């Protein structure tokens, strides 16, 4: 089971929500086959960590680029996280 709910908005856009009570063990390191741009719609205290860096806080309204086939993970914040993913 995935630690999020998502809705496909178009061929290259997905709206994804991580609930505030998601189990931190489900937020695993992973990689995607395409470049992704992630825009934070809602959420406080959530962080994005790329394989070669320290975790960075995800700020509402900001975009984050994740190169294809790079390891990354999300670290849990205080409330639910909603992101818009563009590939």
Image (tube, rainbow, N blue to C red):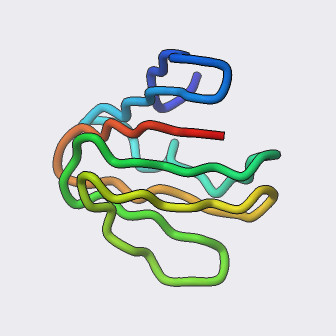
Frontmost residue, 2 versus 45 = 45
In the displayed structure, 66 sits above or below 4; it is below
User: Can you give x and y, in whole percent of width and height, for residue 65 in the image?
Assistant: 57, 61
Name the residue located 40 percent from the left edge and 48 percent from the top edge.
Answer: 39
Number of on-image labels = 0
From the viewer's perspective, tell me whether residue 50 is left or right of residue 60: right
In the displayed structure, 25 sits above or below 86; it is below
Q: In which quarter of the image is the C terminus?
A: top right
Q: In which quarter of the image is the N terminus?
A: top right
From the viewer's perspective, tell me whether residue 9 is left or right of residue 56: right
User: Can you give x and y, in whole percent of width and height, for residue 8 in the image?
Assistant: 55, 16
Frontmost residue, 32 versus 76 = 32
Frontmost residue, 21 versus 84 = 84
Name the residue located 18 percent from the left edge and 43 percent from the top edge.
Answer: 79
In the displayed structure, 70 sits above or below 25; it is below
From the viewer's perspective, tell me whether residue 51 is left or right of residue 17: right
Name the residue located 82 percent from the left edge and 46 percent from the top edge.
Answer: 33
Name the residue located 30 percent from the left edge and 31 percent from the top edge.
Answer: 19
Frontmost residue, 19 versus 9 = 9
User: Can you give x and y, in whole percent of width and height, for residue 53 in the image?
Assistant: 56, 83
């Amino acid at each position: 089971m995935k630690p999020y709910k998502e809705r496909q908005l178009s061929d290259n856009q997905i709206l994804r929500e991580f609930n505030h009570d998601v189990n931190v063990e489900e937020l695993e390191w992973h990689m995607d086959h395409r470049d992704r741009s992630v825009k934070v719609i809602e959420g406080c205290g959530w962080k994005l960590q790329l394989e070669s860096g320290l975790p960075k806080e995800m700020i509402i309204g900001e975009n984050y680029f994740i190169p294809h086939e790079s390891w990354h993970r999300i670290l849990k914040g205080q409330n639910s996280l909603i992101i818009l993913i563009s590939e």
